[in-house]
Amino acid sequence: MTDLDAHVADLCARSRPAARALALASDELRRRALLAAADALAAEGPAIQAANALDVEQARHDGLSAALIDRLRLDGKRLDSVVADLRQIAELPDPVGAILEERTIAQGIRAEKLSVPIGVVAIIFESRPNVTVDAAGLCLRSGNACILRGGKEAVHSNRALASAFRRGVERSGLPADTVQLVQTTDRALVPLLLRRDDAIDLVIPRGGEALIRHVVEVSRVPVIKHDKGVCSLYIHRAADHDMALRLIENAKCQRPAVCNAIENLLVDAAIANEFLPKVAAWAGSRVELRADSRALPLLPGAKAATEADWSTEYGELILAVAVVDDLESAIVFTERYGSHHSDGIVTADLKAAERYLAAVDSACVYHNASTRFTDGGLFGFGAEVGISTNRIHARGPMGIRELCTYKWVCRGSGQVRV
Amino acid sequence: MTDLDAHVADLCARSRPAARALALASDELRRRALLAAADALAAEGPAIQAANALDVEQARHDGLSAALIDRLRLDGKRLDSVVADLRQIAELPDPVGAILEERTIAQGIRAEKLSVPIGVVAIIFESRPNVTVDAAGLCLRSGNACILRGGKEAVHSNRALASAFRRGVERSGLPADTVQLVQTTDRALVPLLLRRDDAIDLVIPRGGEALIRHVVEVSRVPVIKHDKGVCSLYIHRAADHDMALRLIENAKCQRPAVCNAIENLLVDAAIANEFLPKVAAWAGSRVELRADSRALPLLPGAKAATEADWSTEYGELILAVAVVDDLESAIVFTERYGSHHSDGIVTADLKAAERYLAAVDSACVYHNASTRFTDGGLFGFGAEVGISTNRIHARGPMGIRELCTYKWVCRGSGQVRV
């Protein structure tokens, strides 16, 4: 047995008993454990910041970009915010034990569909160390044990954060192993871990496309992906132009790097002559436009788009613009090139809106609102694990409720099947 | 490109447009398509039976057991029953388009959680040809296109059934490709198909452990398993003995080959001396008992159980019997050895029952009822795709509702994120 095999075996052996203890722990105990973890993180602030300084120094030494180094940094103010977020997670309503449905099944047996934790959840993520605390907090709130595998760049920070978190949990009386951090940054561990579908019930990869692809390829454990967003806005012929421009500005520019920002703008042919010059004026030199052959003449300064543009997640101030014949063409375009994450229509025509909302099969579809609302916090879920691009179990914003599954509790009086 | 690659590419290319047409088809149209498929199956009865005769003859030639040949056989009566089942599926209430939840999210945007089809579902199964029609029917009712891969033994039957089904669907105006049958029995196709997570949204393997293991190992497509059942009944010290014996008889003997039959009997130490002789008398020479060291002296004629017995799905008239100290020991035993499928407690002590129901984490947990009730039909779901042993998305009986996912439909009035 190699060291990696031994580490995986150890992580898996510790997780199940912790998950069982957690599944049976009261709402109050899980809440207290989260507050104790928050206290421990606050108390160990200096040690955590010292560990983070090691990561930042290493990142500088390795020549990482200023943006990446900034993502990595956990100064006093950011740590305060991580602790405050954790206290908020503690106050979220308990998702465990809700009766989702009651039915009388055969022969008068009463069946309850009861919400229960999934069990052991592995979360594999990159970069920002605050994810360590968020993910651990959301799993604990929803009664799940977790195995966290963070990025190499944040290894010292993650260890300090996880240690403090575990000490807090232990003080509350729950097992520290409800939260485990993978102790090696060796990538060869990931496939070994994800072969253990006997011990791990779900894996959530959060990060770049390569990470997610790798997890999907090697995992025997069910995966809920948080994959890329190629989102679009369609400006229908009956759109209010000012509203359309406000929504384009918000959906493209408010935070271009995130998955719910738009990459494609579709403009109805009936209004292209009038509306596209307004888009050009809006974009100015700030937003790069890549246009199809019909939009190009109406967008001075735009580049010609290639086929690849329509399914590219730019993550920066670039917008691909296409003219579509009508509503149906917009739907076909969105279904063909989009990633089924978040898409919207701008129109004053309610019938057109309803047709679009029914026909576009994305996790979130919008009428007259920015795609940027696809967010667990804005949906009222409290914190979010992420935005699921899976089709089963959880779709779109994924909060603590989506970290639960269910079981059927059936109460009889001696019934036998005939 | 090999023939297999070409076949997989063709299946995948045809499925998505069919799934899109189906997702937007009305309840009435999907219902009519199912009835048309039933009519076509009835009309083509002689051809289907002739095809089935070829399979039966081949099975005889290959020396398959009488039981397997019987499972394969599709005589006039059985075909009538397949057609009648399909007509029942047509009459099930539409699971698509239900509003599962409504909420006001940020800035007054109205969000509806709407039930929608999953998309393209692959079902990989063995032996009985009626599964071809059932699976196609349930997928169509829930708006999903399907790719079916049946067992080698039923190849002629499956082709005849799928052809008739497709002709019926086409007559209704929906695309025939909503139902596609894999045309080769070459096992090498399965991994190629299951690499296409771009084209297939879910795979459901139904069959033996080896098939399910293989699918889990090679699939990049999300899997909902229908795996083995190692189920148990725990006879608590406060159980009514007559009720306990009736439930044991039903759960073990009514149909020993199915996944919701019990394999393990746990008897409370406090009643072992009195109750186990009754178990011995019940078992007689009909049921083979395999007992732990405490039960063995009280069960004349029983064999000694080995460690492997506690997690074996016998599928026949064999029952493993263990004496447990108390309720908590019964829970620990069930969690350790069971497959989290269906487990029950027999007791008149409601407090003990509630503790058991909370602590045993199986898809279905029973108090004073047979584990044999774990069944989509008996749960009132109509027909079932099977019994899911997954923890996410669908757990326990899986019907047409569990063949749906959801999307968020959000209606605003120009809101932008701040």
Image (cartoon, coloured by chain):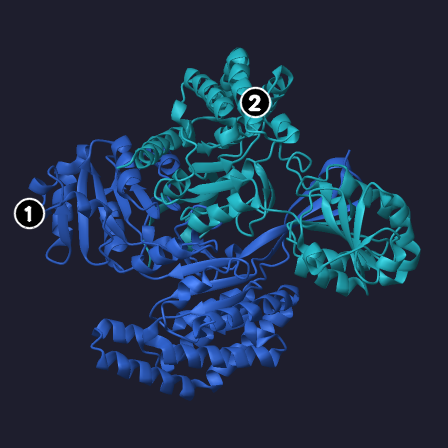
Chain colours: A cyan, B blue
Q: Callout 2 environment at 10 Å: few (<14), some (14 to 19), or many (20+)? A: many
Judge left or right: residue B287 versus residue B97. Answer: left
Q: State the image coordinates of residue B199 (x, y, percent, origin top left).
A: 54, 62
Q: Nearer the viewer, residue A342 or A353?
A: A342
Residue at figure coordinates x 39%, y 46% from the top left: B364
Label 1 crowd (10 A; few <14 / some 14-19 / many >=20): some
| Percent coordinates x, y for residue A203 in the rendering | 46, 42
Left or right, residue A143 beside residue B351: right
Residue A56: which disc?
A: 2
The residue marked by circle 1 belongs to what chain?
A: B
- Which quadrant is the C terminus of chain A positioned in? bottom left
Query: Quadrant location of the N terminus of chain A?
Result: top left
Q: Is residue A300 above or below residue A177?
A: below
Q: Where is residue B360, by image quadrant? A: top left
From what the image shows, is residue B66 above or below residue A254?
below
Query: Disc number at residue B300?
Result: 1
Q: Residue furthest right?
A: A274
Residue in the image at 59% along x and 30% along y: A64
Q: CA distance from mark 1 to mark 2?
A: 72 Å
Q: Look at label 2 and name its amino acid.
A: Val
In front of the other: label 1 or label 2? 2
List x then y, in percent, for residue A401: 55, 38
Q: Nearer the viewer, residue B216 or A101?
A: B216
Question: Residue drawn at (39%, 35%), measured in percent from left and top?
Answer: B358
Task: Point out residue A281 in the picture as x, y percentages from the top left corner.
Answer: 90, 46
